[in-house]
Amino acid sequence: MPVNSNKPRQWKADIARSVDMYNSWFMRFAPVAFRETRVKTTRDVEAALISTSYLTDITPTIFRNSPDILPTLRMSTCPPLAVDRLIGLAGISPSMVKRMENEKKLPVRMTGADIDRELVKIGAIIEKMADPDIFVWRGTKKIPSDAEIHRAATIVADRLCGAVANPIIRNAQEKRQLAAVKAWLEAHGYSQIPAGNGIRFDAMQPGTFSFRMNVPVKLENGVQSVNIPVDAVIMPKGAKAKQLPILFEAKSAGDFTNTNKRRKEEAVKMNQLRKAYGKKVQFNLFLCGYFDSGYLGYEAAEGIDWVWEHRIDDLALFGI
């Protein structure tokens, strides 16, 4: 029996309360989450400056030791360089740059000599376009002071964090949501399964739960298997033999536009889970923030139910 997906008359009131809850959290904690990330990023940028002789000697060895340094270097130029702009200016392999950006690794199908040639080109562009207003020591022979290094690193860190502000906030909100689920479950007599113990989701004991657990499904070809990561997997205390646990995806959003862009993601997961485990599989959402009637109606039509964080006690209505 659905809990919230079949009650459209109460959606409007729930949406308003959810938006208020998200905004309250954002005003109190989002600046803290962003600031903490910026402090860590500043330390990483300082280390990058030291390893590149304060942005005056960017060699292939630097990239080989730390492929993840590339975003920092892109944000060190004037103007900051987008990935595609760097590729165009340096005349380098798009696949190599995108692998460095996304996977923090160098290519495995290129020869060492070819990789070094590409890395030299990247280094040359970064050195040529390094922002002189940030790296004030460039063009002089003096070693920058600690204050100058820290000031430059802070500016670059701001640029890096600004480019990924939404993921920073979303990750902080997800941690808070899962902490709320954990507190509720433990208060109702559930025990968390320690991470890394190797227990499959369909072998969990009644009265247990786990976070960020992989659920295997088959792709369209029926042969290849992939893992779907699920935020919260809960085996009810009254579960019968061979009963599947209840699955929840923690979702938060700071505006209505992005939720409607992302609403198909959950529907795809639901379809994959049904094909693998039948129509009895329960895949639900744990919502906080900007989720309008269009989003809710779409998910309800796909057979997906939800719990609002401001009414977390609705978890009990799922038989938990």
Image (spheres, rainbow, N blue to C red):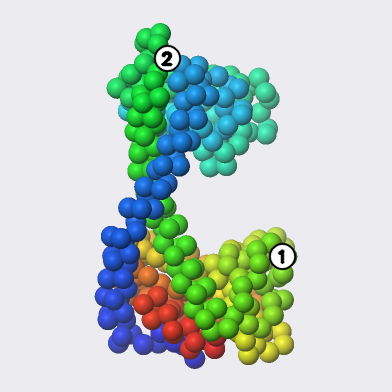
Q: Nearer the viewer's eye, disc 1 or disc 2?
A: 2
**Residue 49 vertical placement versus 19 (above, below):** above
Residue furthest front in the image = 146
295 vs 71, left or right, is left
Q: Is residue 147 above or below residue 204?
A: above
Q: Which picture quadrant has residue 255?
A: bottom left
Which corner quadrant of the image does residue 276 belong to?
A: bottom right
Give me the disc on residue 81: none
Q: Would you name the residue on which mark 1 appears?
A: 197
Residue type of the residue flagged with mark 1:
Asn
Q: Is residue 107 left or right of residue 144?
A: right
Nearest the viewer among 4 and 316 is: 316
Q: Is residue 303 in view?
A: no
Query: Which is more N-terminal, label 2 or label 1?
Result: 2
Q: Residue at x 66, y 83 (%)?
A: 206
- Which element is circle 1 on? loop
| Residue 57 on image: x %, y % | 50, 16
Residue 306 vs 46, above or below: the answer is: below
x and y percent of residue 265 in the render?
Answer: 48, 64
Q: Which quadrant would the C terminus be assigned to in this image?
A: bottom right
Residues at marks 1 and 2, CA–CA distance in whole angstroms: 50 Å
Q: Is residue 319 left or right of residue 140?
A: right
Name the kind of residue labelled 2 in the image: Ile
- Mark 2 lies on a secondary structure that is loop
Taking depth in this image into account, of 216 and 235 the one nearest to the observer is: 235
Q: Looking at this rendering, what residue extends furthest in the top direction?
A: 141
Residue located 45% across and 30% down the image: 46
- Proximity of marks 1 and 2: CB atoms separated by less than 8 Å: no
Q: Which residue is mark 2?
A: 143
Residue found 52% across the figure and 81% down from its top? 187
Tell me which residue sits at (46%, 72%) in the image: 180
Residue 175: x and y in percent read 47, 62
